[in-house]
Image (cartoon, coloured by chain):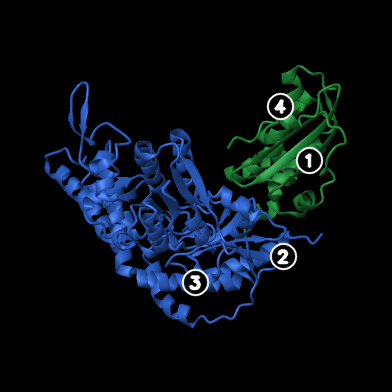
Chain colours: A green, B blue
Amino acid sequence: MSGFDDEIYRDELLDHYYSSPRRGRLEQPDVAFEDENPLCGDRVRVEVKLANGTIEDIRFDGDGCVISQASASLLCEKAVGKRVEEVNRWGVKEVLQFLGIQLTPVRLRCALLPLKVLQVALAIPEKKGWSSAESPRSDSDEPRCAH
Amino acid sequence: MNERTTTPVRDTSELNQLEERVRRLRTDFPILAREVRPGVPLVYLDTAATSLKPVRVIEALAEHYRQRSANVHRGIYAIAEEATAAYEAAREKVARFINARTPEEVVFTRGTTESINLVALSWGRANLRAGDEVIVSELEHHANLVPWQQICRQTGATLRHLRLTEDGELDLDHFRQLLSERTKMVAVSGGSNVLGTIPPLHEIVRLAHEAGALVLVDGAQSVPHRGCDVQALGCDFLAFSGHKMCGPEGIGVLYGRRELLEAMPPLYTGGEMVKKVSLTEARWNDVPWKFEAGTPPVAMAVALGTAIDYLSEIGFSFIEAHEAAITRYAYERLQEVPGLRIWGPPADRRGAVVSFSIDGLHPHDVAQFVDRFGVAVRAGHHCAQPLHELLGLRATTRASFYFYNLAEEVDRLVEALQETVRKLVRRL
């Protein structure tokens, strides 16, 4: 029996998968983005409330495998209270640190989807020149996953 | 779509009899001797993605490079002539295998996808016009869907979709309604890689021809398991891959009726496919070489010939009987797993493919968890996204079988799935 998989499916990650306190929607998010991993059908939506360049509140929603959903939950936990610039610097290393596991390349895509979605969401006000406070909810101009 | 939850009544005596031979055949596959991890043997249940390779095919590849590594159709030295003879002998083997009228009706391609693209792009560009219609079914693999979407978009033709019944079979009444004098091509799978559905090809060909349409059969999932007699079936094109039938990757076949192939323009141009070239123009070679621009995958074609010999020795009567028995066994045993639903037709009307979902579990987690038991199954949409949308699913887990699979491997899958459910599913 491989210890590797036992780690992936350890209770802590299953807790995040089945009952994350961060799962849900925000009343009035400043930015939101949703994307999917077309290969496996993981879907993650992230909604963020910003205050002076800091992530004030954050929620995720979606469906998918344990890795993608637990990664989204952990990402939300770690991102709240952080500066946007800092979250934008996060990459593979940070995501694996949050999860506390090693992953094969295929499953790494599941783990990275939430961070990708969050970073796209955080780029929305900057691209459009909005201050974080006045950026609108972005449902209408979300790019559809093009795959 | 119906889910199946009937209680099993198991009779494995037939399967047990067949398994004596399966055990002998398994010794032909070196990979079956390896462990995935120390103490964990491989349980390979993903033949629908690619089959395992018998040692004879592996050796045929190596032997070609050891003995006859030369380009074909050009050299006049001994090993080049041998390579050419071996390549063309492989074409003759394929022609006999599918009962083509002549070897010239067999075009070597890289695989099923390229074969279908060749027809869509070459035949489609030359023959489809605005107002024409192409019919595909809702269960097609992307390889037999996207090329037709593209060529219809380019030519202004309309793509129509043949509906499925509740059981995941093709709705022939709907097919009759769709067919008209506008129908120019019917492109249909010989076997679903998700549901296991086996479309009634003879009936489809008859109805399509009555309407004046051509028929292309995507044989990727049917030829390796049941073969195909193109003359008896009467299809106009047949596409299939080597790697799903014990051959190597990188080699596939497009069968086309000779007069159709002759009338089609080449898709790729360059060396090999020309008779005479001047600075300003070129005259095409005869079929099938007109469609084989550049150096072909000679060793792979030769090894495909070896795979065909191997399958022919086993015989499709054995392969079909064993697959029917192991599929029925899997279909029944899988229903012992709590919350598991099988999608598609009943066990006696499907190929050696069983796709399922388990309540509360994502297929990716299922596939990863059973991998710890050495069980290789596929998770995802299996390149049939529209079909999964139809089922209301993002993905499924799929087990698929071939003549080298044992009932005890199905048992391992079922035990692994039961363990998965025990460990991962939380009743909320």
Disc number placed over residue B326 in the picture, else none? 3
Residue B51, percent across and down?
43, 57
Mark 2 or mark 3: whose residue is earlier in sequence? 3
Q: Amino acid at mark 1?
A: Phe
Parent chain of label 4 = A
Q: CA distance from mark 3 to mark 4?
A: 52 Å
Label 2, label 1: how far apart the Cα atoms are: 27 Å
Image quarter hosting the C terminus of chain B: bottom right
Q: Counting other residues with Cα less than 10 Å from the Cα at mark 4, is it few (<14), some (14-19), or many (20 or more)?
A: few
Q: Which residue is mark 4?
A: A89
* Rendered image: mark on residue B422: 2
Are the two marked residues, 1 and 4, in contact with CB atoms closer than 8 angstroms?
no
The residue indicated by pointer 1 is A60
- Crowding around mark 2 (Cα neighbors within 10 Å: few <14, some 14 to 19, many 20+) is few
Q: CA distance from mark 2 to mark 4?
A: 39 Å
* Position of residue B78 measured from the top left corner of the image (x, y, whole percent): 12, 44
Q: Residue at x 20, y 32 (%)?
A: B283
